[in-house]
Amino acid sequence: MPRGFAELTNLTSANFLAATLLADDRVKQGVYPAIWDATERQWKPPSGVMNSLKGAIRKLLGMPGWHPPTPQDLSGYLAKNVLQTDVPETDLRRISYRNTDPAFATYLIGKIYTLLDQSLKSRSTKRHAANIAYINQAINKTTSTDLRSAIIALYAQEERRMMLSSSDLPFTADMIDPPTAGTTPVSPALPVVYGAAILLGLLFGVLASVYWESRSR
């Protein structure tokens, strides 16, 4: 697997990525809809009796209270929910994410890809620029013809890599298919839901029959 591609796929839950994503209001709303106020554009503590009870218990135990999500929190969320699988018999990797809002799910996957590719491209460009500057100094200080020729060849390699990282094309990996959302919901599983509904209906029917039979005696 090429180094750049491996870095991209290994960084989908990196803290620096999570920090950048957390500055995006759409990400806040999509990942944390219960505690992000899109109108006021601010975090709001979770409400309700259970959340108040949890807060009281945490305070009693000396544990920190509620706080807005941090990059570390979002990083953990991404690690659990942005999944990667190999495409059989290819070198391709499929990245998937589930959300109740299909439009946001496709947005987040596309955003992650774009941010990581741009970040790795920028880092590579800076590295090669620093290498080129160093090699230029080495050329000026070198008097040996053979060593100078070797340094000039190295300079040409760095210039080539610099041009590749400066291109407008994707740097680490090509996106074969743009992010798309399936038309069939994957959660909840409909067969399970239907099966549970049928069982509950039968149970309710039996209980009702027993109840009315006992009443009629």
Image (cartoon, grey):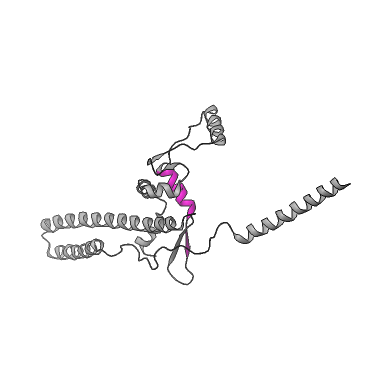
Residues in magenta, as a range = 71-86
Q: Image quadrant of residue 126? A: bottom left
Q: Which residue is drawn at 82% across and 49% down?
A: 212
Q: Position of residue 9 (x, y in %)?
A: 41, 58
Q: Is residue 193 above or below residue 19?
A: below
- Return the residue nearer the eye: 200 or 3: 200
- Return the residue nearer the eye: 119 or 69: 69
Q: Is residue 73 magenta?
A: yes
- Return the residue nearer the eye: 41 or 164: 41
Q: Name the outermost residue toward the bottom.
A: 89
Q: Residue at x 81, y 47 (%)?
A: 211
Q: Position of residue 136 (x, y in %)?
A: 14, 57
Q: Which residue is drawn at 21% across and 54% down?
A: 130
Q: Where is residue 73 in the image (x, y as percent from the top left)?
A: 44, 44
Q: Is residue 181 above or below residue 71?
A: below
Left or right for 160, reference 116: left
Q: How many marks?
A: 0
